Amino acid sequence: MSSLTVTIIQTNLHWEDKSANLKMLQQKIEGIKEKTEIVILPEMFTTGFSMKPETLAETMDGETVQWMKRIAAQKKIILTGSVIIEENGKYFNRLIWMLPNGEYGVYDKRHLFAYADEHAHYAAGNKKLIASVKGWKINLQICYDLRFPVWTRQDFQSENKYDLLINVANWPEKRSIAWQTLLRARAIENQCFVVGVNRTGEDGNKIYYSGDSTIIDPSGEIIYEKNKEEEVVTYTLSKEKVTETRNQFPFWKDADSFIIKDI
C-alpha cells in the first residue's frame, strides 16, 4: 500500500496584496525541510476572500499560475490552492492543482457563498476534479462546498471513488463549529481521509479566521488540528488505513445510488 505525504500551510493572508502573499508563501514553502509530495494553500491565497474580481483577477497565463509552476518544479511537489481567475469574460474562484512538470488541473468552486455575495461576482463550476497520485484518488473542493454532502458523496460503484478529500478555505471563526463538524462528517460518511486547510487572522472586512486546519482519518479520528496560530505541518497518510476501514466496516455497500445533474 502506498503512502502520501501532504503539507498544510495555515497562515494569515495580506488583504488583496498578491505580491506580499506570494513572497510570504514562497518563504514558507522553501522553509519546508521534510520530504513532501503535496503542499496545500488556503482558498484565494493571493488576496483573501475578496469580492473585487474586476480588479484582482488574473488569467491562467498570469503571475500566480507562473509562480505555482516555478515553485512546484523547484520543490518537486504538487502545489494547490485557489485563486481569482478571469476566463471568457467570467470570474472564477478556481483551485489549481499544479504538478512538478508544469501540467495542471483546475476545479471551479461549485457552491458560491451567497451570504457574502460571492454568487454576484463569480461564476459557479459544474465539474469535479478527482486527481490521481501514486494510486490515490483525491477529491478537490473549496470552502462552502463542504456544506453540501451530495456534491461530496462517494459513488462507491464508480471508477472515480476517492481516498482523500482536500478542502481549501477562508472559513470564519464564528462558524468554526460547522467547519470542524462537517469535515469530520465528510470523512466518516465517505470513509476517506479529509484534509481541511483554512487561513488565520483578520481580513479587510474585519472578519476573523481561526484556522482550525485539520487532518481526519477514514473513521473520523482527528489526526491533526491547529487553532489560531500559523503553522506549516507535514504528515504522511497511509492508503492501508482507507482499505482497512472500508473492509472492516463495509457500510459503503449499503449506500444509495444517485446522479448529480450539471448546473
Image (cartoon, helix red, strand yellow):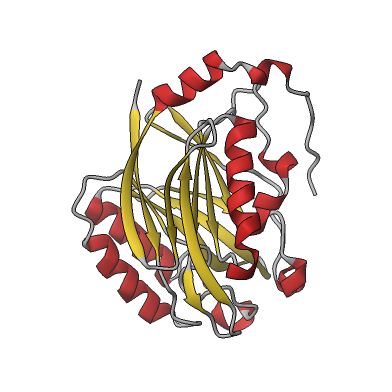
48 to 176, vertically: above or below: below
Looking at the rendered image, the quarter that the N terminus falls into is top left
Q: Is residue 189 left or right of residue 75?
A: right
Residue located 53% across and 14% down the image = 247
* Residue 57 seen in the current view: no
| Residue 262 position by quadrant | top right
* Residue 218 seen in the current view: yes
| Closer-to-camera residue (262/142) | 142
| Residue 37 position by quadrant | top left
| Residue 74 position by quadrant | bottom left
| Closer-to-camera residue (232/51) | 232
| Closer-to-camera residue (158/171) | 171
Q: Residue 35 in the image: x percent, y percent?
A: 22, 45
221 to 239, vertically: above or below: below
Residue located 47% across and 50% down the image = 214
Q: Residue 19 in the image: x percent, y percent?
A: 38, 80
Residue located 66% across and 19% down the image = 251
Q: Residue 10 in the image: x percent, y percent?
A: 41, 63
Residue located 59% across and 79% down the image = 207
